[in-house]
Image (cartoon, grey):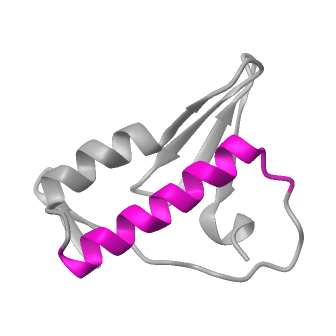
Amino acid sequence: MHVPLGGGFMNFRHRTGGAGAVDIPPALGKAMADYRALLDELESGAIDESTFRHRALRVGLVLREQDAWILDLSTERWWRYDGVALSSLRFGDAEG
């Protein structure tokens, strides 16, 4: 599904699979599930693009004591910041 954003389009799709197991914190796992549900709502027409963007902003930020996870919709990556460095996790790497 293509969603217009700032004059361009973003491609949202569900990915499944992944060869290796990834240790996903429970809060991040919940955010991923919430995001998948949000995509389903958008794709079914239950919500409009504006509502999607607003809710994706809330879903895509997971703050924990030791780190923060941020969803970058344009690259379909979750970025982890631990106070020192950024690392990333692509959706397909974590979903299975």
Name the residue nearer the viewer: 87 or 37.
Answer: 37
In the rendered structure, the answer to whether residue 68 lies left or right of residue 57 reads right
Q: Is residue 6 magenta?
A: no
Toward the left, the furthest residue is 7
Q: Is residue 28 magenta?
A: yes
Question: Which secondary structure dominates the residues rendered in magenta?
Answer: helix
In percent of width and height, residue 88 lies at 68, 47
Which residue is located at x 50 percent, y 78 percent? 14
Quarter the N terminus occupies:
bottom left
In percent of width and height, residue 95 lies at 69, 70
Stretch in magenta: 23-45
Residue 82 appears in the picture as rendered: yes
Which residue is located at x 14 percent, y 51 percent? 50
Picture quadrant where residue 66 is located: top right
Which residue is located at x 65 percent, y 72 percent? 92
Name the residue nearer the viewer: 42 or 93.
Answer: 42
Total numbered circles: 0
Residue 5 appears in the picture as rendered: no
Quarter the C terminus occupies:
bottom right
Toward the front, the furthest residue is 46
In percent of width and height, residue 2 lies at 24, 74
Which residue is located at x 72 percent, y 67 percent? 93
In percent of width and height, residue 72 lies at 46, 48
Picture quadrant where residue 62 is located: top right
Compared with 1, 74 (above or below) is: above
In the rendered structure, the answer to whether residue 26 lies left or right of residue 76 reads right
Compared with 7, 26 (above or below) is: above
